[in-house]
Image (cartoon, coloured by chain):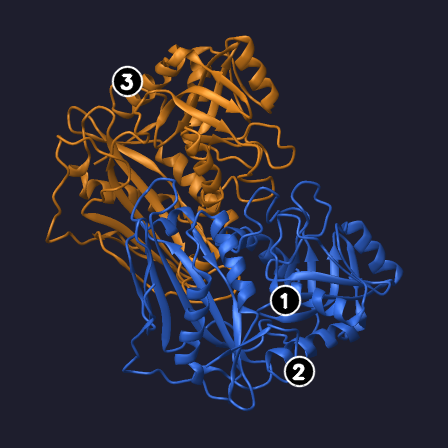
Chain colours: A orange, B blue
Amino acid sequence: MQNIRIEKTTCPKEKPGNDNPLTFGTIFTDHMFEMDYEVGKGWYDPRVVPYHKLEMEPSCMVFHYGQEMFEGLKAYKTEDERVLLFRPDKNIERANRSNSRLCIPEIPEDVFLDALKAVVNVDQDWIPTKPGTSLYIRPFVIATDPFLGVRPSYTYKFMIILSPVGAYYASGLNPVKIWIEDEYVRAVKGGIGEAKTGGNYVASLASQVKAHDEGYSQVLWLDGVHRKYIEEVGAMNIFFKINGVVVTPDLNGSILPGVTRNSVISLCKEWGIPVEERQISVDEIVKAGKNGTMEECFGTGTAAVISPVGELRFGDDRMPIGGGKIGELTQKFYDTITGIQLGEISGPEGWIVEVK
Amino acid sequence: MQNIRIEKTTCPKEKPGNDNPLTFGTIFTDHMFEMDYEVGKGWYDPRVVPYHKLEMEPSCMVFHYGQEMFEGLKAYKTEDERVLLFRPDKNIERANRSNSRLCIPEIPEDVFLDALKAVVNVDQDWIPTKPGTSLYIRPFVIATDPFLGVRPSYTYKFMIILSPVGAYYASGLNPVKIWIEDEYVRAVKGGIGEAKTGGNYVASLASQVKAHDEGYSQVLWLDGVHRKYIEEVGAMNIFFKINGVVVTPDLNGSILPGVTRNSVISLCKEWGIPVEERQISVDEIVKAGKNGTMEECFGTGTAAVISPVGELRFGDDRMPIGGGKIGELTQKFYDTITGIQLGEISGPEGWIVEVK
């Protein structure tokens, strides 16, 4: 593997000012990382280059057969100007598990980490520093063979693009309302639900549109076999605090193994809070929502970090949670994880990787 | 809706000669159809233009969230040089059903049909005429918003590209061997299995690679809930002739409603052959394969038209069918449908649309 080649832009873009609040995923930085793959040659020519449009054949397999994988993580700048990544090793591991399921060649872990560091380093002046902002990092792979026919592609492109972002939900850290879906299904065991790939997201849109129309910002999925067990929110994993115990669905083969999910479970164990990864039926949730034992509910994901849930809706049952306020433990997870991400709190060993 | 603008190429490509056999989906013609969509504006600027690369932002939603739809149909040239499409109305209907499930705006049916005719007409000299060849037509839509975040795109591009093709399977009309999959799942009711979209195809790759390694050319899927009922082959629907009755799985919500499937059922009814669309368990298939009542088995799809199946494999059970030969009814379906497609046999009313 050769070193990463760096080609800097000659016409830098204007950076967003501090006056207007940042939205999510609309502004991109001056540079991107790119690396190509060919069967027989492997991954080659890793490079940081000016952010640019892609020239693609209309027959490229990614447009037809959905062979695509993505990841999401964030970079933060500390008060003393250090640049930090949060648990990039977990994203790299998961990317390669996704790749394996999608028949995309694995990316060497050291190359992946070097690529993340290189492109973030070049564009570190783009990292916003206002509270609640960060630099969102989007690594992704697409199949590029110009071929119509169903087989794994022989060529791929791996890219990393960067976007300075504010809160994922326009509502910020205010509690979101979530619709429990019983018509559409996101994924099923044996399928691609564990992989971070487009097919799982397009499957979620129809339900999301329906939920939005009803005034709900996200959808909570049930399993595809029994239509009975809680899965995930699509953009987030889900946690409940019921009777003092933190519970979340176990990694059963059809939900995404979230990095923030894993971090919350680790913190529970460190703090001595009982935490269970297990099958959770929607009946249990409705019951806990109605009899007052549902103390808190929140989503976890890289984009929103921790997102308090203020209402769950299942059929005609509406379950308000926390009286419109953020739960105490939910707030503590948010403060602790963002504190670790910003270098203000020292987290477990290895959670923070500095870009130098 | 304005008329379709036509811009012809000034540097036509060399057409494939008649000497080398055509493969599938590797050569593209001189022109393509293109039309854009914006929320509030609708579909606009329909045009036939020289075949060209697309300039795409790396943040385009199609690369990340899989919002893409495709169709497949074929054009044929008759001995007296007429250009025929086979049941394009069925593809247009299905495209809009897929679009609806994927939150892609519908394409007006008349515009879609005009677009097919216009681009095929401009490139009609590309339609190959040797037996078993045709011009494969690939309409597809991709989401083009440069945005990272999960929601339906506000902008789309609809394209039609054309490829002169030979047989889909390298083996031609020789019987294929099919692996019945019991580990991976393609789709589940409530998901996107009914829609023609990338996510269903990428989900199939890992199983297909496994089957290829075992010497099988395609995978037959079981349902995702019970892991017990026959679904489809991914590139084809599946038919069995058992004890004189033609049976195929019913359209249960997780399999693709194939145009060739529909045509075979229509022909059965016309010919007075008993045909059943119903739930079929893999146990029934294994039993029929072993006790000699499985008379024929074949796949149906636009790419391969009719594809005889010579062996089914489920776990350790191998079920040879037809002694390596094409079944009599299978051959009759192939001859009749390709005869209708080539204008040599007159088919049911409306199956053939001439491009003028």
- Residue B245 in which image quadrant: bottom right
Q: Residues within 10 Å of mark 1 (few under 14, many from 20)?
A: many
Q: Nearer the viewer, residue B18 or A180?
A: A180
* Secondary element at image label 3: loop
Q: Nearer the viewer, mark 3 or mark 2?
A: 2
In the drawing, what numbered circle is on residue B58? none
Q: Secondary structure at mark 2?
A: loop
- Give residue B295's quadrant in the image: bottom right
User: Alpha-carbon neighbours of circle 3 within 10 Å: few (<14), some, or many (≥20)?
Assistant: few
At label 2, which amino acid type do we have?
Answer: Ile
Question: Is B309 above or below relative to B78?
Answer: above
For the residues marked 1 and 2, what is the alpha-carbon distance in whole angstroms? 16 Å
Mark seen at residue B345: 2
**A332, A209: nearer the viewer:** A209
Chain name for mark 1:
B
Q: Residue at x 74, y 76 (%)?
A: B332
Q: Name the mark nearer the viewer: 3 or 1.
A: 1
Q: Marks 3 and 2, how far apart in space?
A: 78 Å
**Left or right, residue A192 beside residue B182:** left
Query: Residue A345, which numbered label?
Result: 3
Q: In the orientation shown, which residue stands out farthest toward the right? A: B291
Mark 1 / mark 2, whichever is N-terminal: 1
Quadrant in which the N terminus of chain B is drawn = bottom left
Amino acid identity at mark 3: Ile
Q: Secondary structure at mark 1?
A: helix
**Residue at 74% across / 72% down in the picture?**
B330
Disc 2 chain ID: B
Please indicate whether residue B236 sits to the left or right of residue A149 in the image: right
Callouts 3 and 2 in the same chain: no
Q: Given the image, what chain letter belongs to the residue carrying mark 3? A: A
Give the labeled residue for mark 1.
Answer: B260
Residue at 55 percent across and 13 percent down: it is A288
